[in-house]
Image (spheres, helix red, strand yellow):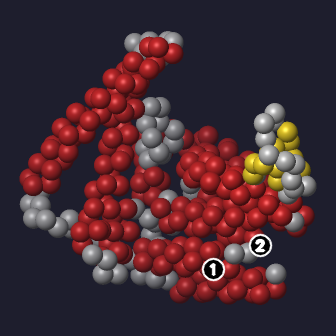
Amino acid sequence: MVKIIVLCAAFLMIAFFLKERHEHSHACCEEAHHSHHGIGHKHGEGFEIDSYAYNSKIKHWNSAFKVLFSILILILCIAFDNPYVSVVVIIAMAYLTIVKGGIPVHAYLSVLSIPIVFIILGTITIGIDFSRRPMGQYNLYLGFFYVFTSQAKLKEMLFLVLKVFAAISALQMMALSTPSSEIIYVLRKAHVPKIIVELMDIIYRYIFILMDAYTKMKNSAESRLGYCDFKTSCNTFGGIVSNILIVSMKKAEAYYDAMEARCYDGELIFWMEDKKVETVHIAAASSFVISLFLLWGFT
């Protein structure tokens, strides 16, 4: 347990070091990213994951290689169920995304902050339980019941958080370095049913369209003091939710008309650049996978 805590502390120190290392360069290049690539913080907009993917420094890597590598790492994290392996995967994926990919640290942490909240809320029930009488090594009386836990439960919760976080880090490495169109192309080559692939692509893109529409409505309401008090905030929120349905239907019709204007015949076709798999990438990925097997075997 102590070793795992030390490894987690080491990861936090590495993340802090990377943040300090990139803080100056990010401050210098932020204006250029805003004007040329659209990367950086955009007031009133959601996460532009595709923007980071299109401007990643490892975008030129073969898409199939990145997808297969991330899926393999995800499977190994779940199959090994080893906290040491999970910590190494978290550090390695952060290195690939931040250092090799050039994604700003704050952007990477912002993208990961959403699943982290769900992970903690989903695993906290494993470490904490309730009872009418005192149980476990640690308990707290709250008047009508006890909240209790133990070192074994906390250890299980920590290991599960690390495992899930490592698996998500592998997927985020793929998402932040591979445009969605290339992921869709890889799924097509893997003979995933066409209807599933196209629904994935349309739903994924439409999420950001709705987020953009919601953000514009929210900013408009804020500029008109729509959130000045609790009652007004509730009314504003209700109005935005009702308008979202209407706006979504209008945008769906507009985007479908745009697709038909571009000769849409029931199949989405993307132009794909031919990217060769480099030998050094295969060697590095193989070495990393072998090291995970060795780490799992020794621990």
Left or right: residue 126 compared with residue 52: right
- Residue at image position (27%, 75%) is 193
Quarter of the image holding residue 254? top left
- Residue at image position (70%, 70%) is 86
**What is the number of the mark on residue 84?**
2
Residue 194 versus residue 238 in the image, above or below: below
Task: Name the residue beneath numbered marker 1.
Answer: 79
Numbered disc 1: secondary structure: helix
Residue 127 versus residue 198 in the image, above or below: above
Residue 174 coordinates in the image, percent (x, y): 50, 66
For disc 1, the neighbor class at 10 Å (few under 14, some 14 to 19, many from 20) is few
Left or right: residue 9 compared with residue 121: right
Numbered disc 2: secondary structure: helix
Name the residue type under label 2. Tyr
Name the residue type under label 1. Ala
Front-most of 272 and 114?
114
Residue 202 coordinates in the image, percent (x, y): 28, 56
For disc 2, the neighbor class at 10 Å (few under 14, some 14 to 19, many from 20) is many
- Residue at image position (47%, 14%) is 231
Residue 15 coordinates in the image, percent (x, y): 73, 54
- Residue at image position (39%, 20%) is 236
Residue 265 versus residue 50 in the image, above or below: below
Front-most of 126 and 285?
126
Quarter of the image holding residue 77? bottom right
